[in-house]
Image: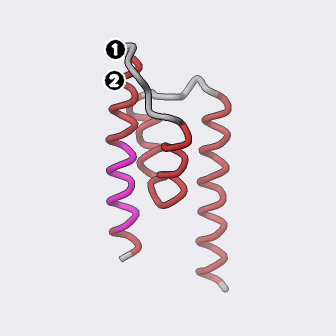
């Protein structure tokens, strides 16, 4: 069930990253970074990272990269915590 949730949220997050990338190219209204981080926090971090790498989106924003790394690090730590504990 958890894997299904992560897969679904990752796909949604990747799609929203793609939309934001195309909105940026077109000079249109963007998706707030808070929305992207919220999606990542609730399970969409693989989609966020995939969007960054595959779409080359938000890769020049140091704060975005650091924040994404912190979210992924927190999730990995929590996974180990619950897996071992």
Residue 71 placed where, x, y %? 62, 52
Tag 2 secondary structure = helix
Q: In the displayed image of the protein, which residue is found farthest to the front?
A: 29
Write down the region rendered in magenta: 5-14
Residue 13 placed where, x, y %? 39, 47
Asked if labels 1 and 2 touch by Cβ distance under 8 angstroms, the answer is yes
45 w.r.t. 27: above or below: below
Residue 19 placed where, x, y %? 33, 32
What residue sits 44% from the left and 27% below the top? Answer: 30
Disc 1 target residue? 26
What residue sits 61% from the left and 26% below the top? Answer: 61
Disc 2 target residue? 22
What residue sits 54% from the left and 46% below the top? Answer: 37
Residue 7 among those drawn in magenta: yes
Tag 1 secondary structure = helix
**Residue 27, located in which quarter of the rendered image?**
top left
Query: Label 2, label 1: how many angstroms apart (C-alpha)?
Result: 6 Å
């Amino acid at each position: 069930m958890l894997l299904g949730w992560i897969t679904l949220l990752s796909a949604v997050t990747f799609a929203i990253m793609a939309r934001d990338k195309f909105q940026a190219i077109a000079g249109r209204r963007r998706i707030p970074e808070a929305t992207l981080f919220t999606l990542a926090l609730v399970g969409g971090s693989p989609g966020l990272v995939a969007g960054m790498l595959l779409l080359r989106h938000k890769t020049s924003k140091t704060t975005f990269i650091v924040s994404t790394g912190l979210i992924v690090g927190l999730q990995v730590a929590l996974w180990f915590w619950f897996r071992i504990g």
